[in-house]
Amino acid sequence: MHVVILGCGRVGSALALEVERFGHTVAVIDQEPRAFQRLPASFTGRMVTGVGFDRDTLIEAGIEKAEAFVSVSSGDNSNIIAARVAREMFGVRRVVARIYDPRRAEVYERLGIPTVATVRWTRDQMLRRLLPEAVTPEWEEPSGRVVITQLSPDSGWVGRPVSELERAAGIRVACVTRYGEGLIPDARTVVQDGDILHAAVARGRAAEADAIVRSAPEPD
C-alpha cells in the first residue's frame, strides 16, 4: 500500500524507513528541506517539501492513492488539520495523528481520529515502570468506557486457569506476555510466574480489578 507521512523528524523518518522495509511505498512531507537529511541515500520514497494540509502538497505526495496517512510533525494543530483533510477530503481510511496535549487527544479520539498522545504515553510508560501499582491504560476505546491495561498477577494465581482470574476480577484477558512473547489465552491456559496480562476492563473498575489480580486468590 501507499503511505503518506507528515513530518520528517526522528519519528517520521524512522516510520518512513520501516514502512519501506515492509515493502510499501511511502512519501514524506516536511516544510523544511533539510529535514530530509535524516533519510539515508538508500531511501527510495518520495520527499515532498510543503505544508502538510495543503491540497496540492498532499496530491504531490500521492494522497489520492494512499491507504494510510500519519501526522507526526511538531505541531498539534498541523497534525490534526492534516489528518482531517486526509480523512475527510481524500477519504483515507487509516489516519493517525501525534498529539502532545492529552486533552486534545481525547477530543479527537471522540471525533474518530486515532491519536497518539506523546506526553500521556510517556507518562504512562514511566509510571508503569516506577509504580507497579499504578493503573495506566495501554489503550482505550473512543468513548473512554473500556480500557486495556497491563496487570501483573500475584504469585498465588500461578497454576490457576486464566479464566478463573477473569471471573474473579471481572476482566477479559486479551493477551498474555510470557518470557517476552505474546500468546492468546484459551480454556487450558494457566497463569505462570512472571506472566503479564493485557486485560480489557471497564474504566471505572480498573483499580478494583488491579487490586484483585495483585492479591492472592480466595481459598477454595
Image (spheres, grey):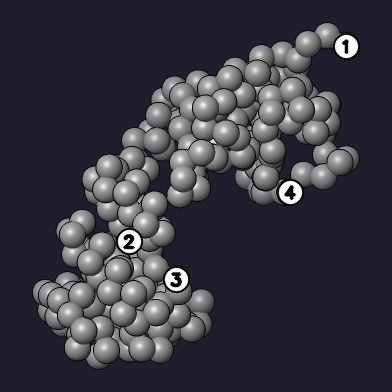
Q: Which residue is mark 3?
A: 94
- Per the model, the C-alpha gap separating discs 3 and 1 is 48 Å
Q: Amino acid at mark 1?
A: Asp
- Per the model, the C-alpha gap separating discs 2 and 1 is 49 Å
Q: Nearer the viewer, mark 3 or mark 1?
A: 3
Q: Secondary structure at mark 3?
A: strand
Query: Is residue 166 left or right of 58 when viewed as pictured?
Result: right
Q: Nearer the viewer, mark 3 or mark 4?
A: 3
Q: Which residue is mark 1?
A: 220
Instruction: Give whichever of discs 4 and 1 has the lower sequence position.
Output: 4
Q: Nearer the viewer, residue 167 or 138?
A: 167
User: Percent position (x, y) of residue 61?
Assistant: 28, 86
Task: Using the image, tell me which numbered label, if any, was put on residue 184.
Answer: 4
User: Percent position (x, y) of residue 9?
Assistant: 23, 65
Query: Alpha-carbon neighbours of circle 1 within 10 Å: few (<14), some, or many (≥20)?
Result: few
Query: Is residue 172 left or right of 9 when viewed as pictured?
Result: right
- Per the model, the C-alpha gap separating discs 3 and 2 is 10 Å
Can residue 40 be seen in the rendering of this structure? no
Q: Quadrant of the C terminus?
A: top right
- Per the model, the C-alpha gap separating discs 2 and 4 is 29 Å
Q: Residue at x 46, y 41 (%)?
A: 144
Q: Residue at x 67, y 45 (%)?
A: 175
Q: Nearer the viewer, mark 4 or mark 1?
A: 1
Q: Is residue 81 above or below residue 99?
A: below
Instruction: Give whichever of discs 3 and 1 has the lower sequence position.
Output: 3
Mark 3 vs 4: CB contact within 8 A? no
Question: Which of the 4 quarters of the picture holds residue 154?
Answer: top right
Q: Amino acid at mark 3?
A: Arg
User: Percent position (x, y) of residue 182?
Assistant: 67, 49
User: Percent position (x, y) of residue 102?
Assistant: 29, 43
Q: Amino acid at mark 2?
A: Ala
